[in-house]
Image (spheres, grey):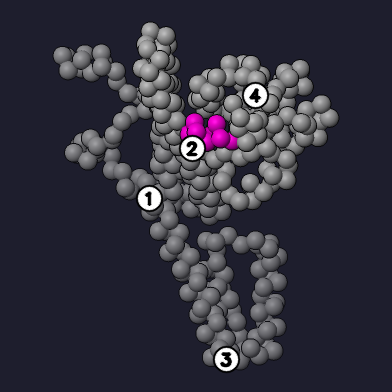
Amino acid sequence: MSATVDRDLALHLEALRKERGDTVKVDEIGDIVRSLLTTLSGDLSAGDLKLYQEVEGLAVYIHKAKAEIAALRPHDIQQEYIASATDELDAIVGATETATNEILDAAEKLEELTPELTPEQGAKLMDTTTRIFEACNFQDITGQRITKVVKALKHIEERVEGLVAAFGPEFQEQLANTIAAQSPAGSSTITDQDLLNGPQMPEKAHDQAAIDALFND
Amino acid sequence: MSVDKNMHILIVDDYKTMLRIIRNLLRQLGFVNIDEATDGAMALSMMRGGGNYGLVISDWNMEPMTGLQLLREVRSDAKLKATPFIMVTAESKSENVIAAKEAGVSNYIVKPFNAETLKVKMVSVLGDF
């Protein structure tokens, strides 16, 4: 790059720094690059131009990436999918713990029958209950594995939140527009796909009495 | 010397289901005096409170005090340091085993485990029963 271009570029960058500070919003990168290209004067080499084209291309790429991220609806990832996944995993831990304790209750009750049996029968019964106790180990292991997955999901959630925050309020606005565009008002038709929700969380689920009431309504 | 099956055993785990499983397996092995703690700090308090335990069987991954921290506390306490201590944990990396050995663990059982493994490790620590 020539000395004239270097000086002009330095002056322009200094002016930008005074005007905008050291931190430039992603949205403004394209404007800045264009501004630099239009105001630069002097002996621009082919290499300089190539460099500026690359920088402008980068700005365009960032804009496109932002639009694509907005289309992914990161708020949905945060507030719906991840929140729902962690709730479901917590429910799995709770349900397996309850089931395991039921199994242990039953095994302990079986053991209480030992005095009523012959020593041989009692030994066989104890072998069986021992195997039940051993098998119930799974609950601790699955619980720990699920806790690790929940931690990983929460980490992703924090990263998505950080990404949305880093893009600033303009991005949030763009996001809101995307969501509005993808959710047309009055769209209330329930499709077959909408009916495939799997088991509900206990606090949201209907019990059999409620189902009977709906069915008989 | 045979093992006194009336000795007091302290089992430590933050999963109550696991405490129940270990208690049942110990009972089937003939041990009846079993106390439970749900983390290292509670266990240490029970030990320092005069529990006089002949064996501690502890999980590793607990809050606020882990099994490893409990082990270090026990080994650095003049009154408690001779207490046999078996770690029962899902932590199976070699660095975990090395760290536990360096801290003075008596034996190490990886979850999930069976009754036979528990018995074998107890025999290696306490002697035959």
Q: SS of the residue at dot 4?
A: loop
Q: Is residue A167 above or below residue A104?
A: below
Q: Characterize the local packing of mark 1: few (<14), some (14-19) or many (20 or more) Cα atoms within 10 angstroms.
A: some
User: Same chain, marks 3 and 4?
Assistant: no
Q: Characterize the local packing of mark 2: few (<14), some (14-19) or many (20 or more) Cα atoms within 10 angstroms.
A: some
- Which residue is denoted by mark 2 in the rendering? B112
Give the residue type at disc 2: Pro
Task: Between label 3 and label 2, give the one nearer the viewer.
Answer: 2
CB atoms at circles 4 and 1 under 8 Å apart? no
Residue segment shown in magenta: B114-121
Q: SS of the residue at dot 1?
A: helix
Q: CA distance from mark 2 to mark 4?
A: 26 Å
Please say whether residue B62 is visible from this viewpoint. Answer: no
Q: Which mark is residue B3?
A: 4
Task: Specify whether residue B120 is painted magenta.
Answer: yes
Q: Characterize the local packing of mark 3: few (<14), some (14-19) or many (20 or more) Cα atoms within 10 angstroms.
A: few
Residue A61 percent coordinates (x, y): 46, 68
In this view, the residue in front, B33 or A57, is: B33
Mark 4 falls within which chain?
A: B
In this view, the residue in front, B102 or A198, is: B102
CB atoms at circles 3 and 2 under 8 Å apart? no
Q: Quadrant of the N terminus of chain A?
A: bottom right
Q: Which mark is residue A178?
A: 1
Q: CA distance from mark 4 to mark 1?
A: 72 Å
Residue B17 percent coordinates (x, y): 50, 25
- Which residue is denoted by mark 3 in the rendering? A45
Give the residue type at disc 1: Thr
